[in-house]
C-alpha cells in the first residue's frame, strides 16, 4: 500500500491537505482526494493542494516554477483557491521548495492563470488579477431564506454568485449545509456567498461586510478567499462610485482583506490574510 507524506494547513479555517509532487509522479484519483478530505475516515479538509513543477504537469501553463493543482473535497477540479494559494506559498517556503524575499514576489501557476504572492504583516497577499461580472442576475434559493434572491455572478477567476441578505439574523439563519439552487445554473457551477454590510458600511475609508459561503464540491466552509474578493467586489458594485477600494471581510474563520488597485490591463483585486501550517504526517492510500 502506497504511503503519502502530507501537511495540513489552513487560511482563516479554510483547510487543506498539501502534498509535494515536484516531478509529477503522483496521480490522485477523485476517490482518493475525497478519502483524504473525509473528516471522519481521512485527514479532513476542504480540498487538496498538490505542489508540482509546471513542466511536470500537462495541465499547467505559464512561466512560474510551481503549479498549484487544487482539488475540491469531492475530488473535482477547481480553477483557483484564494485561501489555498496563501497556504500553498507557506508550504513551499517551509519545504524549502521556493524563496520569497521580504520585498519580493512569488509567481504561482493555477488553472485560473498565474498569480503573484507577496508577504504581509499577517501572512500573504495574492494578486487575483482582473475579474468579470455578468449583466444578468442569477436567482438563488437558499434553505432557511423565505424566497429566492437575485445574485451577482462574478469570476475571480473561479465562478461565484453573491447574494445580499437583509441583516445578521438572515445571514445566521441561512442553512448552507444544503447546496443553494441557482437559476439559471452556470455551466461550471458556482460558489455562493451570502453577504451583509456592516453598520456603518464604511469606517475610516474601509468597507466592512460579513460573509458566509457554500463552495461547490466542498459544502459550507469557514472561509473562501476568492469568495471574499467576490463579495467585496459585489458590495462595491452595489454601493456605487463612492465605494472604497479597501475592504475588510469577516468570515466564520476570521478576517480577510480585499483591495482594488489599478493595473496595466485594468483594475486588479488583491486578497490578503493569514496562512498556517498545522501538522505533517504520513497516510496510506
Image (cartoon, rainbow, N blue to C red):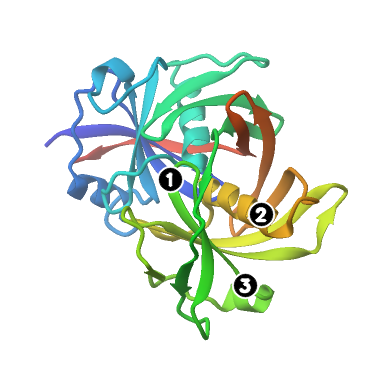
Number of numbered discs visible in the structure rendering: 3
- The earlier-in-sequence mark between 3 and 2 is 3
- The earlier-in-sequence mark between 3 and 1 is 1
Quadrant in the rendering for residue 48: top left
State the CA–CA distance, disc 2 to disc 1: 18 Å
* Disc 2 secondary structure class: helix
Name the residue beneath numbered marker 2.
237
75 to the left or right of 262 = left
Q: Nearer the viewer, residue 252 or 60?
A: 60
**81 w.r.t. 212: above or below:** above
Quadrant in the rendering for residue 49: top left
Q: Nearer the viewer, mark 3 or mark 2?
A: 2
The residue lying at 20 percent from left, 38 percent from top is 28
The quarter of the rendered structure image containing the N terminus is top left
22 to the left or right of 180 = left
Q: Nearer the viewer, residue 227 or 83?
A: 227
- The earlier-in-sequence mark between 2 and 1 is 1
State the CA–CA distance, disc 3 to disc 2: 15 Å
Q: Nearer the viewer, residue 268 or 211?
A: 268
CB within 8 Å, label 3 to label 2: no
Name the residue beneath numbered marker 1.
158
The quarter of the rendered structure image containing the C terminus is top left
* Disc 1 secondary structure class: loop
Q: Position of residue 41 (x, y in %)?
A: 27, 56
Q: Nearer the viewer, mark 2 or mark 1?
A: 2
Q: Nearer the viewer, residue 4 or 234?
A: 234
Q: Which mark is residue 165?
A: 3
115 to the left or right of 24 = right
How busy is the neighbourhood of tag 2: few (under 14 within 10 Å), some, or many (20 plus)? Answer: some
Amino acid at each position: 500500500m502506497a504511503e503519502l507524506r502530507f501537511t495540513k494547513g489552513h487560511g482563516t479555517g479554510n483547510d487543506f491537505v498539501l502534498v509535494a509532487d515536484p516531478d509529477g509522479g503522483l496521480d490522485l484519483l477523485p476517490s482518493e482526494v475525497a478519502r483524504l478530505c473525509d473528516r471522519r475516515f481521512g485527514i479532513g479538509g476542504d480540498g487538496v493542494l498538490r505542489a508540482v513543477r509546471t513542466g511536470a504537469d500537462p495541465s499547467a501553463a505559464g512561466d512560474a516554477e510551481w503549479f498549484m493543482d487544487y482539488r475540491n473535497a469531492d475530488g473535482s477540479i477547481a480553477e483557483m483557491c484564494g485561501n489555498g494559494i496563501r497556504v500553498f506559498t507557506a508550504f513551499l517556503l517551509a519545504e524549502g521548495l521556493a524563496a520569497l524575499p521580504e520585498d519580493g514576489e512569488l509567481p504561482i501557476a493555477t488553472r485560473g492563470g498565474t498569480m503573484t504572492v507577496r508577504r504581509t504583516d499577517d501572512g500573504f497577499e495574492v494578486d487575483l488579477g482582473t475579474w468579470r461580472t455578468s449583466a444578468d442576475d442569477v436567482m438563488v434559493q437558499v434553505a432557511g431564506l423565505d424566497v429566492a434572491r437575485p445574485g451577482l455572478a462574478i469570476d475571480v477567476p473561479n465562478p461565484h454568485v453573491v447574494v445580499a441578505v437583509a441583516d445578521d439574523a438572515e445571514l445566521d439563519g441561512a442553512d448552507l449545509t444544503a447546496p443553494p439552487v441557482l437559476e439559471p445554473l452556470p455551466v461550471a457551477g458556482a460558489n455562493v456567498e451570502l453577504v451583509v454590510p456592516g453598520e456603518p458600511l464604511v469606517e475610516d475609508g474601509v468597507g466592512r461586510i460579513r460573509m458566509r459561503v457554500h463552495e461547490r464540491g466542498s459544502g459550507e466552509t469557514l472561509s473562501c478567499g476568492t469568495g471574499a474578493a467576490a463579495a467585496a467586489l459585489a458590495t462595491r458594485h452595489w454601493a456605487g462610485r463612492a465605494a472604497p477600494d479597501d475592504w475588510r471581510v469577516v468570515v466564520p474563520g476570521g478576517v480577510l482583506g480585499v483591495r482594488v488597485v489599478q493595473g496595466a490591463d485594468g483594475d486588479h483585486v488583491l486578497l490578503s490574510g493569514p496562512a498556517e501550517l498545522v501538522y505533517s504526517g504520513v497516510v496510506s492510500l
